[in-house]
Image (tube, helix red, strand yellow):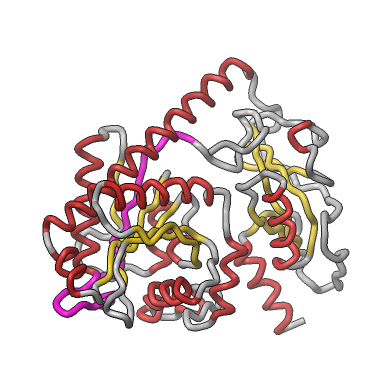
Amino acid sequence: MLLVSLPAELFADRRGFVRTVVIDAGHGGKDPGAVGSRTQEKNITLSIALKLGDYIKQNFSDVKVIYTRDTDVFVELHRRAQIANENHADLFISIHCNSARNSSAYGSETFVMGIDRSRANLEVAKKENAAILYEEDYLETYDGYDPNSPESNIIFTLFQNEYLNRSLDLASLVQDQFRERAKRVDRGVKQEGFIVLYRATMPAILVEAGFLSNAREEAYLASAEGQDHIASAIFRAFRDYKTQQDQIAASWDQQLLAQHTETPEESGPVSPKPAVAATGPARETTENSPQIIFKVQFASTREKKPLDAPEFKDLEQVDYYFQDGLYKYTVGNVMTLEDAAVIQDQVQMAGFKDAFVVAFHNNQRISPAEALRLLNQFKTNP
């Protein structure tokens, strides 16, 4: 939960109380999802999502529940995460059902954003991401992403963000509940490049409740009892996760109130200072090339800390920028996402497990996807 050796006020970007959860029923409308012998994924996921939302509403009056869909309608993948982002959600839960060529496959598994290069997991991601083929202009919307391209799926490693650890925590709690309470076969917690997860700017998980390609499991998932069990298991995991996060947030608030009585003097963003690259080649740009650099952000604080602070002792050439009322600390100053990914691995190995890649264009922070778009534009029209 906490970054090793760091004080309580130091965090990657946003940690706090769990007050808003977005529940995403996978597929819908013209996209049926996985199809069993007598069921469609879109109908089962909607039923489970609504049951889960009801459990949360009944037990937590302080939590706002938002659905990406509550009827049988088609919602684009990018729009699902956008709904969560627009509502400043603290948690995103996407519910799905699985399928396989082998009809004997069964069990429940939960995914977080990332890349597990096993062929089986890649096939699951390709199947779920293929929903974008129902959308118009999907190549433009998703920066040229092709769900059938292994290279496109691998690029998602570069979009892991500061919410990965908490996503893993929740995913583990879900699988514990599936195994211990719902008595489902536990297929484990896995990482893969799901579009719906990488665009979410909060802890996010994707639950594969079971296999519609397995006749026995399909019957279970189609039953009211089975759907109740799945929804109840996810709810219990949510309950435990919320309790943990609320306790941590309350502890931080108490410490911040005790230690800090003044707000930072700065009131607006400042441009990041150039930093010496922790690894990677020196920047070489032409007069017309986009001024894009990549860094790895590993922490943020409300109060400015010296760059040689003891907490940063295992890192070289620490830099910072000020944005949204927070001091955000980085290392690295490289030209490519690939080099930034190497730095990210080094920083995470140093104990900063929430480290993630950020990009700057002319000293203004932009998304890595926007940085890639600008670089590709320059390659096409130098």
**Horizontal side, residue 308 vs residue 258: left or right:** right
Judge whether residue 130 can be spotted in this image.
yes
- Find out whether residue 38 is within the magenta segment: yes
Rendered location of residue 318, percent (x, y) = 80, 44
Rendered location of residue 89, percent (x, y) = 41, 46
Rendered location of residue 107, percent (x, y) = 30, 64
- Find out whether residue 113 is within the magenta segment: no
Q: How many marks?
A: 0
Rendered location of residue 134, percent (x, y) = 35, 80
Kindly identify the residue that appears in the image at 48 percent across and 50 percent down.
168
Q: Is 337 above or below relative to 85? A: below
Kindly identify the residue that appears in the image at 33 percent across and 63 percent down.
208
**Horizontal side, residue 98 vs residue 300: left or right:** left
Q: Would you say the magenta stretch is mainly helix, strand or loop?
A: loop
Kindly identify the residue that appears in the image at 64 percent across and 58 percent down.
366
Kindly identify the residue that appears in the image at 23 percent across and 78 percent down.
35
Of residues 151 and 191, the one nearer the viewer is 191
Residue positioned most to the left? 224
**Horizontal side, residue 206 vs residue 46: left or right:** right
Image quadrant containing the C terminus: bottom right
Judge whether residue 82 can be spotted in this image.
no
Residue stretch rendered in magenta on the structure: 16-41
Q: Is 375 above or below relative to 15? A: below
Q: Quadrant of residue 58?
A: top left
Q: Quadrant of residue 381?
A: bottom right
Q: Is 7 above or below relative to 286? A: above
